[in-house]
Amino acid sequence: MNILAPVRRDRILAELPQCLRKEAALHVHKDFHPRVTCACQEHRTGTVGFKISKVIVVGDLSVGKTCLINRFCKDTFDKNYKATIGVDFEMERFEVLGVPFSLQLWDTAGQERFKCIASTYYRGAQAIIIVFNLNDVASLEHTRQWLADALKENDPANVLLFLVGSKKDLSTPAQYVLMEKDALKLAQELKAEYWAVSSLTGESEASGLLQRHACLPGLSLLSLQLCPMTRGLERPLSTHLLHVSGENVREFFFRVAALTFEANVLAELEKSGARRIGDVVRECLPG
Ligand SMILES: Nc1nc2c(ncn2[C@@H]2O[C@H](COP(=O)(O)OP(=O)(O)OP(=O)(O)O)[C@@H](O)[C@H]2O)c(=O)[nH]1
Ligand SMILES: [Mg+2]
């Protein structure tokens, strides 16, 4: 009996989401690994569908870790900074190639005084997301240390790494290009996949937002003011919660879910292969 509610329709992945930059990607294949696709079609994914994969999000204080998670999980944005004390987590359920798959997203504190509490939750991560602020070069430099600390509790061979530049909305195109160059270099060195995101807004959201605003009069007006294409709309504000979708946030978390799922299925296939030593191993070929 399935006691869980069905997966949200907007959390269903039928294809592999693509990387942001080919220069710093975990892999650049267009599709899921053929063995994974084949195993899913034949319902041979073992325990993957029942597992919850742990993902930890680390990085300097105030780089936007909590906002990133809240944008994806709750579609909200709070412009007021409230430091995370210790840790917090959100669960996200996906369906990947027809198989249920859950991510537990651990939001950790960046403040030094809470770091020792947060680091006790690093263990057992399948993916590590290291966040830095695209407008603060020191936060990029500190990502090495965040990663080193997170890897003390995890096996580097079994963990997927993502280096995420946040607050893209605050950088000019010229500033962004400069920062991206350094970030790509570091991502390559750390063997992490690079992403740049904004939890606040994105270019593509403005027109949709206006339409949504037209049919939902109660929608936050602050979002319209902060959005580059609608900044002229001045009105008194009643709330700080903004209702736009962010830039690359959904794409990024879908990529995390897809690659974590793929790694899980491959590991499961390897395990079941090892259990059946001597059996005829059936190879699944693409197409
Ligand atoms: N403009 C802009 N501001 C952002 C963005 N993401 C976060 N912020 C702001 O940055 C501040 C810090 O965001 P948080 O998400 O709380 O930062 P954090 O990394 O969780 O901080 P700690 O919990 O202390 O480690 C808040 O005031 C947010 O509103 C973004 O994409 N764009
Ligand atoms: Mg936080």
Image: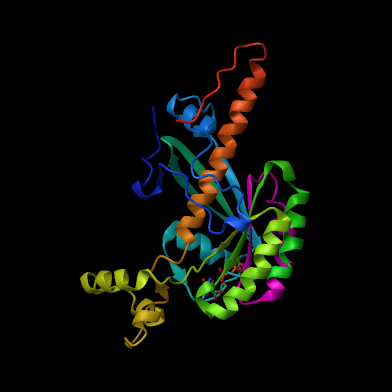
* Nearer the observer, 117 or 127: 127
Q: Percent from the top left, x then y, of residue 241?
A: 41, 72
Residue ID at (43%, 59%): 74
* Nearer the observer, 261 or 192: 192
Whether residue 60 appears in this view of the structure is: no
Extreme residue toward the left, this view: 215
> From the image, which quarter does the N terminus lie in?
top left
Is residue 115 rendered magenta in the image?
yes
Q: Quadrant of residue 165?
A: bottom right
Is residue 130 rendered magenta in the image?
yes
Residue ID at (65%, 76%): 136
Q: Is residue 119 above or below residue 287?
A: below
Q: Quadrant of residue 186?
A: bottom right
User: What is the number of callouts on the image?
Assistant: 0
Q: Percent from the top left, x then y, of residue 163?
A: 63, 60
Q: Percent from the top left, x then y, of residue 140?
A: 69, 69
Q: Quadrant of ligand 2?
A: bottom right
* Nearer the observer, 63 or 23: 23
Q: Percent from the top left, x then y, of residue 150?
A: 73, 53
> From the image, which quarter does the C terminus lie in?
top left
Q: Please state if 271 lies on the left or on the right of 211 as rendered.
A: right
Q: Is residue 185 above or below residue 14?
A: below
Residue ID at (50%, 39%): 32
Whether residue 204 appears in this view of the structure is: yes
Q: In this view, does 233 lie above or below 84?
A: below
Residue stretch in magenta: 111-139
Q: In which quarter of the image is residue 99?
A: top left
Q: In this view, does 40 lie above or below 142?
A: above
Residue ID at (37%, 82%): 225
